[in-house]
Structure formats: structure tokens, C-alpha cells
Image (cartoon, rainbow, N blue to C red):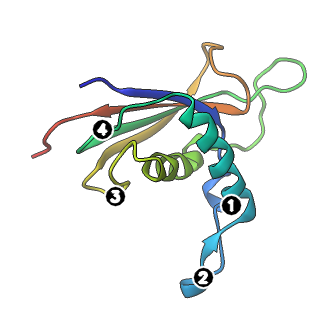
Amino acid sequence: MTCIVFTVSRPPSSNKLWIGEGKNKRRTRRYKGWINDAGWMLNTHRLTPIEGPVVFRVFMPRPINNDGEWSRGKIDCSNFIKGLEDLSVIHGLIEDDSHWCVYKSSSEWDDTGTIEQGKCRVVITPIGDVA
């Protein structure tokens, strides 16, 4: 089985996905807007879903400042995994984002220059049965 690869705009940080607590917990307006916009981008890829356990990898361009140097701002690329996993579940690319389906997830800075600033690339790879 082949892997799924797609590029979408960077989601809000995991700290900006939800508002409220308990029964009042809901998606933020920003998160709902991103899910809608990224969903349209995702639909143009015409991707084939993967059944069963997967490895979920996120690649983001290292932030740069106006001088073209790496930014020393405080951005944590692992804070963007959750929104991308949710998007993948909503659009049926993976069955779930719980421990039985996403066997492993990771995020990495990409210094190749192949990903635009403000976007991220997701690579979802099937792993077959996990013992």
C-alpha cells in the first residue's frame, strides 16, 4: 500500500484549537475556519484513505525572519500535529487518531526549501498489523 502525502496551510497551534471546558468545550472560530479552508485544499489532492495503523509525520519549514535567517521566535512544530490528525480523520484519510490507529506521530523542521512558509506537509504511512 502506498503512503498519503499532502500539503496544506499550517493549522492553529494545539493551544488554539478549543475553547471552553467539559460539556461547553468546542472548536475555536479560527480552528473551524482552518478546517474548512484546509479541507478544500485537501479535496483537490484526491487521496486514497488508509485502513489500519499508520505512522503520521508532519514537516514544516523552519520559520525565517525578514533577513532570510532562521527566526529565533518561539514556535514548536509538534503543536501542529493534532489539527492535522483531526483534518485527516474528518476527511476519511485515516480511521481515527487514537493510539490504535496512529501508532506513531512526529514533526520535523524541513530545511530543503520545498515547503512554503505558512504551510506544512503531511506524510501518512501504513504499517500493517502492530503486535
Residues at marks 4 and 3 touching, judged by CB atoms closer than 8 Å: no
Please name which of the two marks, 2 or 4, marks the residue nearer to the observer: 4
Q: Is residue 2 left or right of residue 8?
A: left
Q: Residue at x 44, y 39 (%)?
A: 106
Q: Residue at x 46, y 45 (%)?
A: 88
Residues at marks 2 and 1 touching, judged by CB atoms closer than 8 Å: no
Disc 4 versus disc 3: distance between alpha carbons? Answer: 15 Å
Q: Which residue is mark 3?
A: 98
Q: Which residue is mark 4?
A: 50
Q: Position of residue 26 (x, y in %)?
A: 62, 73
Q: Which residue is mark 1?
A: 16
Q: Position of residue 66 (x, y in %)?
A: 90, 24
Disc 2 versus disc 1: distance between alpha carbons? Answer: 13 Å
- Name, please, the residue furthest toward the left: 131
Q: Is residue 61 left or right of residue 67?
A: left
Q: Earlier in the sequence, mark 3 or mark 1?
A: 1
Disc 2 versus disc 4: distance between alpha carbons? Answer: 32 Å
At mark 1, the secondary structure is helix
Disc 1 versus disc 4: distance between alpha carbons? Answer: 28 Å
Sort mark 3 into few (<14), some (14-19) or many (20+) by Cα contacts within 10 Å. Answer: few
Q: From the image, which quarter does the N terminus lie in?
A: top left
Q: Earlier in the sequence, mark 2 or mark 1?
A: 1
Q: Which mark is residue 21?
A: 2
Q: Earlier in the sequence, mark 4 or mark 3?
A: 4
